[in-house]
Image: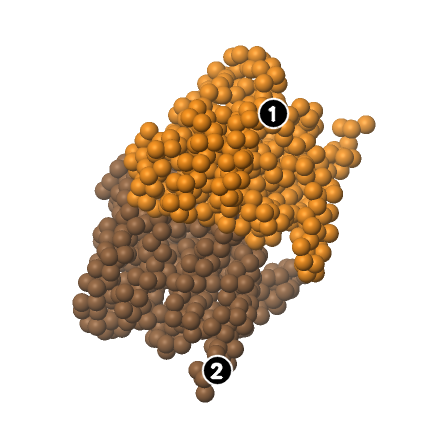
Chain colours: A brown, B orange
Amino acid sequence: MKGTTLSVITAIDTYDIRFPTSRELDGSDAMNPDPDYSAAYVVLRTSDDGAEGHGFTFTIGRGNDVQVAAIQALSGHLVGRSVEEVCADPGAVSRDLIGDSQLRWLGPEKGVMHMAIGAVVNAVWDLAAKREGKPLWQLLADAEPEWLVSQIDFRYISDALTPDEALDLLRRGQEGAGERAEELLRRGYPAYTTSPGWLGYSDEKLTRLAEQAVADGFTQIKLKVGADLADDVRRCRAARAAVGPDVRMAIDANQRWGVGEAIEWTNALAEFDPYWIEEPTSPDDILGHAAVRAGVAPIKVATGEHVQNRVVFKQLLQAGAIDVLQLDSARVAGVNENLAILLLAAKFGVPVCPHAGGVGLCELVQHLSMFDFVALSGTTENRVIEYVDHLHEHFLDPVVVEAGHYRAPTLPGFSAEMDPETIATFEYPHGAFWTADLAGLAGTEVPA
Amino acid sequence: MKGTTLSVITAIDTYDIRFPTSRELDGSDAMNPDPDYSAAYVVLRTSDDGAEGHGFTFTIGRGNDVQVAAIQALSGHLVGRSVEEVCADPGAVSRDLIGDSQLRWLGPEKGVMHMAIGAVVNAVWDLAAKREGKPLWQLLADAEPEWLVSQIDFRYISDALTPDEALDLLRRGQEGAGERAEELLRRGYPAYTTSPGWLGYSDEKLTRLAEQAVADGFTQIKLKVGADLADDVRRCRAARAAVGPDVRMAIDANQRWGVGEAIEWTNALAEFDPYWIEEPTSPDDILGHAAVRAGVAPIKVATGEHVQNRVVFKQLLQAGAIDVLQLDSARVAGVNENLAILLLAAKFGVPVCPHAGGVGLCELVQHLSMFDFVALSGTTENRVIEYVDHLHEHFLDPVVVEAGHYRAPTLPGFSAEMDPETIATFEYPHGAFWTADLAGLAGTEVPA
């Protein structure tokens, strides 16, 4: 007899999950030579038997424990609250967490504390979607525009987007939403792949993976650049030769450059027809991105995976600093702030091509793009979700990418839940893998 | 026989220090109604008997433990290193900490991790200044311009300030530095006081403290605003009546407003002749500050206590968004990044009026302004350091403010060291005060 007694959130359990990805140079780029893909993972436990919300934020190894501590600092805001109320209004939870007047000092709305809030807020949405029996993209697409607007914190963005404008955009997005949902279920959402382009890979591996990407149906790949110009020229030439002239090839500097260097270096690679230059400089440098964009056109400028919040995205759009907006599911304060960012992008007419990869970021972010297609922008033109084929096997509802498209998830929730076996194995430092590894068993085999 | 054996850093000890300031509404403003001033405190221990470096970052209560965890995550970069090498080149330490490729993901260069780096870097400077037998301001003022330039990370700012320009500014600053050092020791550095203006104080207390401030020799006070316009009108009127027409009265909204509201609200207080409006909106909103500045002139716009790093300060200056730059000693990555910020301000001709208050921020930041006066900008015109008369008694070398001026410290170091008794009493949650308080002893008296 669910629902007859009040169900409450009973605990926020946290887990420091780390994968030893640095050993294969997966994910290596000019700023991140040796990432150990990690998740500060959170489970909202409830008094409702079996009802749980799962969420996480992504890190690349050291500091994952700091992220876990930050999530724990938030638990007082959730434990004891009614599951029904929390799920009916995740925006109230988000505002409550962001508004903690003492914790706010540690940001505000940026870095460790903001990512922790994102993990918790995303777990609330996972719980809400499971209770509704819908995948998150569908819950959002089915929601009333008025309710979605109520989920957004317009503080600091109303000079660029008012609640009324947001409502108009969402109402317009409802037209034809049913047909687009069917199209989505039939065809999926376009993806591009970064798998060929890690900086630590040999030219041979790069070429082989680039050819494979085209054979697999991808129409865009991405290469890491920025460590050494001669290497970049050689690698871009090899990749362009492998994929031919019609497949888009993006390049990604991972913030390696200052403004002047970004312009020079990007233009030095122009002969290989890069589609966009991603993270040419500091994610905080709005005016710098605007200068880079002016200096490298017609090559497009993209950023977002490290953009800290909606206020910086707002300015990137106001300043005309980007051609492509790369929101991340777990960098900002979760679904609510990403709704604001999707609406800002729609208002300014800038396509969203989300950042993904790492661990679990593909699983999460697909829901946001699919909602955007079905019920907001209404298009996938010039829009692709990043795809990297790492670590999906650790999730209970892993992404499925076929013929260059993400297949729409149909299971209830936010696709955030990890296999319990994974948690037992990769929890740091006491999981089975790390216990063996830290005991000095050389060459510990990484379980599949 | 100091120096004959290699001295190394043996440990980084951390302490979660919290003061129950919320009980008196000290420090209450429109965004921070009940701060418990706190410090995530770090001591660099060395193998050199008695040589220690002390540093901290400031928080307002909850989350101080997250800050401590972040500092601990950095310890591997310092422990075991030569004290001599570290003190000879704190810039190398700073770059090493900022450059940790895995921890960098948690920022980059913002929020919890960046403040943690600031605490550690500041502790290195405290150690270095103690070894030199000089107060930090003097160590910096005596340093060779070339060495100071080597201490700065120009990444992401060289489009606004090149190393050569920095060198020129510092060389120009050397002219007359000796005379200015004497003047500083004789007269001190101008201060303004925020003590009258906390939002939680009654009008009677506000008036009494404002009159006292003038009697004490201050030529500027500051009031918190932004919660309720009618209250602000009444309080500004009372304060202006108390101080007369010639004392500057700044107002501070602590990020309460969006852009449009900031302009309207500030202009509604214009009749009381506010000198500056501080933190009118999000510290991340560079374009927003520029719009506010255009909308409230001739009232000046000031911000900085929450500005996350040199990249955002650079843009505030590039965009002509601020009249007054309010750097904070413990928000960015310590002395090295603040040198970059002081140089940017000098390049753009914008006066620096540092944020202080909280616990220990006055003690730290006075050194930066004094260096700036002696050996960089060469002036105190339109420059004042914030002063709040709270918690100084907990430091071994507390600030001394007389006749509206900070007296120049003369003891070696960065004035960062707390009384051991304070640490024993206010360490959270096991110090004597908190043990009694958390045991529920109602009305626990706060030790002086």
In this orientation, does residue A373 appear? no
Residue A139 position (above or below residue A261)? below
Q: In x, y percent, where is residue B142? A: 60, 19
Viewer-proximal residue among B441 and B427: B441
Q: How far apart are marks 1 and 2 (CA)?
A: 65 Å
Q: Which residue is drawn at 66% across and 29% down?
A: B413
**Residue that appears at 36% across and 56% down:** A153
Answer with left or right where residue A316 lies relative to residue A44.
left
Labelled disc at residue A119 = none
The secondary element bearing badge 1 is classed as strand
Residue B438 visible in this rendered orientation of the protein: yes
Q: In which quarter of the image is residue B448?
A: top right
- Residue that appears at 34% across and 66% down: A367
Residue under numbered circle 1: B402
Where does the image place residue A16, in percent across and percent down from the top left? 56, 62
Residue situated furthest bottom in the rendering: A1
| Amino acid under disc 2 | Thr
* Chain on which label 1 sits: B
Q: Is residue B403 above or below residue B72?
A: above
Q: Residue at label 2?
A: A5
